Amino acid sequence: MTTNPAIEARQLRKTYTTTRGVFRRERVERAALRGVDLKIAKGELFGLLGPNGAGKTTMVKIFTTLLLPASGTALVLGLDAVKDQWALRKRIGFVFGGERGLYWRLSGLDNLRYFADLYRVPPEVSRRRIPELLERLDLAGREKDRVELYSRGMKQRLHLARGLLNDPEVLFLDEPTIGLDPVGARELRVIVRELADAGKTVFLTTHYMFEADAICDRLAVIRDGVIVAEGTPSSIKTLVHDQGIVEFEVVGMPVERLAGLRSLPGVRSVAISEHELAQVVTVHCARPADVMTRLGVILDGIKLEKVSSREPTLEDAYVQLIGENPTNSEASP
Amino acid sequence: MGTPGVAVTGLARAAFSAFRVSIRLRVISPWAYLNWLVFPVLFAAVGLYVLSSPGAASSHVVYGVLGGGLIGYWSVAYLEGGNGIQEERWNGTLEQIFATPTPLWVILLGKICGGLLFGLLAFLPTAAFAYVGFHAVLPALDGGRFVISLGVLTLSFFCIALTLTPLFALWRWAFSMLNGFELGVYVLCGFMFPVAVLAPWAQGVAGFLAPTWAVRALYASTLAEGPHNFATWWLATIGLSLAYLAGAYFLYALVERRARMSGQLALA
C-alpha cells in the first residue's frame, strides 16, 4: 500500500548502554528497538501503541534526528534520519507530551518567535503564520501572557503551534494528550485529525486506546522493541474476533469460585477488579452464551448483577497483544 | 540573494534571536542580579578594604576597583555557557533547540553574546562603589588600551564559554565541575591580585589561560609604571582563544554525534 512512504523503518535497532555499580563499574546494555520494519504513507495518521518502555519514544526520537539507531535505516520523506538531518529537520515537526519544553518565563508569542527563527522561517512568513497558529489553536488573546500562567491544555496547544511553525510535511506527536483533561484532550484530537485531513502525515504515539481508535487511519502495537501487530483499528480488533467478553458484578465472591470460571470450556482469561463495594469480573471467552448460561451454577448463592456480553474493543486486542502474544501478529489491512 | 546568502542570513537571525532570548531571561531572573550586581560588589568591598589598608601598594587598589567587576563579568559569561545549557536541559528545551535546523553552536553563540553583554554590567556597580565608598580611582587610565584589553578579554571569555558549553551538553557530570572551574579562573588569571603572587606552578598553569594575559593588559592600562607589553599580551590572549575555538570545532562535531548516540540531551 505504501509505494512512496512518508516514513519508513527498515530493521531499525537501538540499544542503550548504561553503567551500574560504584567500585566495580559494569556496562549494561538494554535493547529498546529490536529490528522494527514500518511503512507509513503520505497523509496517513498513524498511531503507535505500546506500554511504557516499549520503544515508542525511542522510535520518534530516531525519526526526528535526536537519536542515532544502532543499525537499520530510518527514512522520512526519503531522507535518511542519520545522514540528512539538516535537510530533514526543516521539513518535520515534533511535539513531546508534558509541560516541559517551553520557556515558561517568556510569553507564548516570544516562544513562537524564537523557535520560528531557529527553524529559519523567513520573517515575512512567520509574521503571518504565528497569528494564524495562535488563532487556530485557540491561544489568540493570551499570546502575550507568560507561559507559566497557561493551563496545561494551553501549554500543549502552544507545543503544537511550535511544532507547526515550519509548516512540516510530517508531524511526530509523542503522547500529546498525556495529562490533559478530557475536554482538552478531545480538542487536541480534533486538531490532529484536521491536520491529517489537510494532508500532513502524522505519527502519533499514545497509551489511550479510544484515542487511537477514534482518529488513527492505521496502527501498530509495539512491545519490548518489536512490532507485534499492524493494521487498521478494525483489523487489529479482528485479532480477537473469535473472542467475546462477558462482564458482571458480584458482591463478596470467594476467590476460589474464579477457578470454576476459568475451567469452563473456551474461557481464555478471567480478570477481577474492585468497583466500590462490588467486584467486576471480566471473562474473555470463545462462546459468551455458554459462559452466561453456566454462571448461575458456578456462582450459586452469590448475588449477580449487571451481566452483559460485548464485542471486543481495541483495548481488548491491545491487552491480548501486550500481555499474551509472544510473537509477531499481522492483522489483515 | 543566492542560497548561501539566505542561509547565512537565516543563521544570523537565529543567533540574534538566541541573543535576545538570553538577555530577556537574564533581565527577569533574580539569580542573574546576584551575579552581576550583588557578588561583584561584595568582592569589590573585600578587595578594596584589604588593598586600601595602610602599607598596601597604592597600585594594587586598581585590583579592588576592577576585580569585582571582572569576577561578575566572568561569572555571568561562564554561567551563560555552562549553567545555561543545564537550564535548557531542566526546562526540556535542550532537545527542542537541538532538533531545529540551526546548529547548536549558532544558538549558543547568540546566548553567550547575550551573557557577555549582561556581564559587562558588573563593572558599573563595582566602579561606582569603589569611587563613592573608597574614593578609589584608576590612577593612570589609558582609555584606548583599556578598551582594546577589555575587548580582547571579552573574546577570551567568549571562546572559553563556547568551548566549555558542549561539554556540559554532552556530560551531565561535568556540571559538578562548574563551580570549581569558575573559582579556579578567578584565582589563576589574577582577577583580584597579580598573578606574580601565585606559586610558580600555578603561574605556569595560568599562562595557558587566555584571560590571564588580557587581565594583565587591562590592569596595565590603568597604571603608569611598566614594563608594558600590550601587543604581546593581546596576541597571547587572541592566540590562546583561537586555539580554544579550534578545540570547540571538534567538540561540537563530537557533541552532535555523541548526544544522538546516548540520548543525554533529555533530563531523564
Image: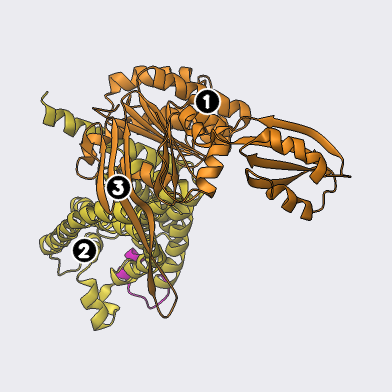
Q: Is residue B17 left or right of residue B24?
A: left
Distance, label 1 to label 2, CA atoms, is 62 Å
At a point 54% along the width and 44% down the height, the residue shown is A320
**What percent of the width, then of the height, locates residue A97?**
49, 39
Distance, label 1 to label 3, CA atoms, is 28 Å
Q: Is residue A98 left or right of residue B105?
A: right
**What percent of the width, then of the height, locates residue A167?**
33, 24
> In the picture, which quadrant includes the C terminus of chain A?
top left
Query: What secondary structure is found at the residue carrying circle 1?
Result: helix
**What percent of the width, then of the height, locates residue A295?**
78, 40
Query: What secondary structure is found at the residue carrying circle 3?
Result: strand
The part of the chain drawn in magenta is B52-64
Which subunit holds the residue at mark 2? Answer: B
Which subunit holds the residue at mark 3? Answer: A
Chain coloured yellow in this rendering: B
Q: Is residue B212 magenta?
A: no
Q: Do the dots labelled 3 and 2 sit on one chain?
A: no
Q: Is residue A277 visible?
A: yes
Which subunit holds the residue at mark 1? Answer: A
Please state which of residues A259 and B212 is positioned toward the viewer in this rendering: A259
Residue under numbered circle 1 = A214
Specify few, some or many for label 2: CA neighbours under 10 Å numbering under 14, 14-19, or 20 or more. Answer: many
Q: Number of labelled discs?
A: 3
Label 3 amino acid?
Answer: Leu
Residue under numbered circle 2 = B210
Please state which of residues A272 and B127 is positioned toward the viewer in this rendering: A272
Residue under numbered circle 3 = A12
Q: Tell me which numbered mark, 1 or 3, is placed earlier along the sequence.
A: 3
